[in-house]
Image: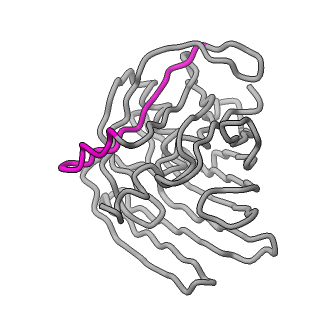
């Protein structure tokens, strides 16, 4: 259980940009992670491009302080995903984390075989000589940290209230989770009041389900009207011992 718990809440809801409309070629979004005192920890920008019919490329760039790393870091993540009428599926991910000198201190590579419902995931920490690769077979729809927000938009678009999924985490591993729509509420974003859906990602721990009573819950908010744009997040930044944060979009 000690090995499992640090990763149960590495299922972050932030970095959930909106989809392109038919008339758009590129969508940009910026967002900031703050501690519960309101102090900024990191800032991120993302760009989504439609690179071929039904296939998109998301690039996320960020800099600041992040749990599990010493000092300031930056990262660049590139994810390809497929969007169909019914679902959103990750295709590949390449995420590189850098120290202040520009050295790569962590790299995550994920490749998904959509036809075979399999994935190959590699976690590297070059300076610590750590490298591990795992292959997974999925029996449910699969999401990653970066694809989850897009999946949630499709989830709302399809009128769903709950769905069981499999989540790929960075160590790497796969966890069963349930995405739930908790209802509508009015939140304030950059001085504006917006009606939003509140969503929860609930880890399904099987025999360890009793542990959830001791874990802080994480929530995300999406606008309550199409395109169900992501608005914010509240919960743990990473693992169970990580900072509790709030993330808000900086532009609407």
Task: Indicate whether 127 appears above or below 191.
Answer: below
Tell me the quarter of the image containing the C terminus: top right
From the top left corner, tell me how far across and down residue 176 is, in percent.
Answer: 30, 49
Point 62% across, 17% down: residue: 187
Point 58% across, 84% down: residue: 128
Point 56% across, 26% down: residue: 222
Q: Is residue 67 magenta?
A: no
Instruction: Specify the farthest residue to the left.
Output: 207
Task: Indicate whether 72 appears above or below 133.
Answer: above
From the top left corner, tell me how far across and down residue 37 is, in percent.
Answer: 71, 36
Point 34% across, 70% down: residue: 135
Nearer-the-camera pick, 27 or 54: 27
Q: Is residue 203 magenta?
A: yes
For residue 247, what is the image quadrant?
top right
Which scheme is used to colour this image of the protein?
A: one colour
Horizontal side of residue 124 vs 114, given as left or right: right
From the top left corner, tell me how far across and down residue 1 is, in percent.
Answer: 29, 61
Instruction: Specify the farthest residue to the bottom.
Output: 129
Q: Which residues are magenta?
A: 195-213
Horizontal side of residue 128 vs 183, given as left or right: right
Nearer-the-camera pick, 172 or 148: 172
From the top left corner, tell me how far across and down residue 122 is, in percent.
Answer: 47, 73
Horizontal side of residue 209 vs 178, given as left or right: left
The count of marks equals: 0
């Amino acid at each position: 259980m000690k090995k499992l718990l640090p990763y149960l809440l590495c299922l972050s809801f932030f970095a959930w940009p909106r989809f392109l409309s038919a008339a758009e070629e590129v969508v940009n979004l910026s967002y900031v992670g703050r501690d519960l005192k309101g102090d900024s920890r990191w800032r991120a920008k993302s760009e989504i491009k439609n690179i071929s019919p039904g296939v998109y490329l998301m690039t996320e760039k960020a800099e600041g302080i992040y749990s599990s790393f010493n000092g300031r870091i930056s990262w660049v993540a590139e994810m390809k995903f497929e969007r169909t009428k019914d679902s959103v599926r990750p295709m590949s991910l390449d995420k590189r984390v850098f120290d202040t000198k520009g050295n790569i201190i962590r790299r995550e590579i994920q490749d998904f075989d959509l036809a075979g419902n399999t994935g190959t995931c590699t976690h590297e920490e070059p300076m610590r000589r750590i490298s591990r690769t795992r292959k997974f077979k999925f029996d449910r729809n699969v999401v990653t940290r970066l694809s989850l927000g897009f999946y949630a938009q499709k989830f709302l678009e399809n009128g769903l209230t709950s769905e069981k999924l499999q989540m790929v985490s960075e160590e790497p591993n796969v966890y069963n989770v349930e995405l739930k729509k908790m209802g509508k509420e009015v939140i304030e974003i950059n001085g504006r009041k917006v009606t939003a859906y509140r969503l929860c990602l609930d880890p399904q721990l099987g025999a360890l389900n009793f542990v959830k009573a001791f874990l802080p819950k994480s929530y995300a908010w999406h606008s309550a009207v199409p395109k169900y744009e992501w608005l914010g997040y509240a919960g743990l930044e990473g693992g169970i011992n990580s900072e509790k944060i709030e993330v808000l979009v900086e532009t609407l």
